[in-house]
Image: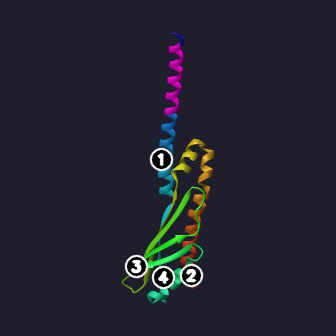
């Protein structure tokens, strides 16, 4: 009878550990889904009508993304290899350049900050204090938003 009590307690302990493990994985997945959908944005910038050539558009974009990363063009597509990535996150930025019916160039930037699954496991394990681990990713997202706002103001000069 004694052995069955110990077996029962061991099995109950293993079941509890398994249940906690599954719960943490599910919470981490939910956290990653929420964080990655929260840390993305789209910016449409209508450039000044004084910018009339494709070269001037490229020059403007290179000057205004110098603090973000290396800008590369592939026809109408833009890719920015961001300088900053930090603890558990990676930033991505891309965009397109087009011309509207008024011969005005339109730049459409999309950016997102993707958090790693391991970071989200720590967030789930140490919730609510674990949310502080998402602060660097949030700051990177805000930096990208601020840079796009500054670019929008700089094109009016």
Please rate how many residues cluster around mark 2, counting C-alpha atoms within 10 Å: few if below 14, some from 14 to 19, many from 20. Answer: few
The disc at residue 63 is 2
- Please tell me whether residue 101 is drawn above or below residue 136 in the rendered image: below
**What secondary structure do most residues of the magenta stretch adopt?**
helix
The residue singled out by tag 4 in the image is 47
The picture places residue 155, in percent across and down from the top left corner, at: 54, 82
Q: Is residue 103 magenta?
A: no
4 and 1 marks in contact (CB < 8 Å):
no
Of labels 2 and 3, earlier in sequence is 2
Q: Nearer the viewer, mark 2 or mark 4?
A: 2
Please rate how many residues cluster around mark 4, counting C-alpha atoms within 10 Å: few if below 14, some from 14 to 19, many from 20. Answer: many
Q: Is residue 134 visible?
A: yes
Q: Is residue 17 magenta?
A: yes
The picture places residue 13, in percent across and down from the top left corner, at: 53, 26
In the image, 10: left or right of 105?
A: right
In space, the residues marked 3 and 1 are separated at their CA atoms by: 35 Å
The residue singled out by tag 1 in the image is 29
In space, the residues marked 2 and 4 are separated at their CA atoms by: 14 Å
Q: Nearer the viewer, mark 4 or mark 3?
A: 3
Q: Which residues are magenta?
A: 3-18
In space, the residues marked 2 and 3 are separated at their CA atoms by: 18 Å
Of labels 3 and 1, earlier in sequence is 1
In space, the residues marked 4 and 3 are separated at their CA atoms by: 15 Å
The residue singled out by tag 3 in the image is 76
Q: In the rendered view of the protein, which quadrant contains the C terminus? A: bottom right
Residue visible at 52% across and 71% down?
A: 81
């Amino acid at each position: 009878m004694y052995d069955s009590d110990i077996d029962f307690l061991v099995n109950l302990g293993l079941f509890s550990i398994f249940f906690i493990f599954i719960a943490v994985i599910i919470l981490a997945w939910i956290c990653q889904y929420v964080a990655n959908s929260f840390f993305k944005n789209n910016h449409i910038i209508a450039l000044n009508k004084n910018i009339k050539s494709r070269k001037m558009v490229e020059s403007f974009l290179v000057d205004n993304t110098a603090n973000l990363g290396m800008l590369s063009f592939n026809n109408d597509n833009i890719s920015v290899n961001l300088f900053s990535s930090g603890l558990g996150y990676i930033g991505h930025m891309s965009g397109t350049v087009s011309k509207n019916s008024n011969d005005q160039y339109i730049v459409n930037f999309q950016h997102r900050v993707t958090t790693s699954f391991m970071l989200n496991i720590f967030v789930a394990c140490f919730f609510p204090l674990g949310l502080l681990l998402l602060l660097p990713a949030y700051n990177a997202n805000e930096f990208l938003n601020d840079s796009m706002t500054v670019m929008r103001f700089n094109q009016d000069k």
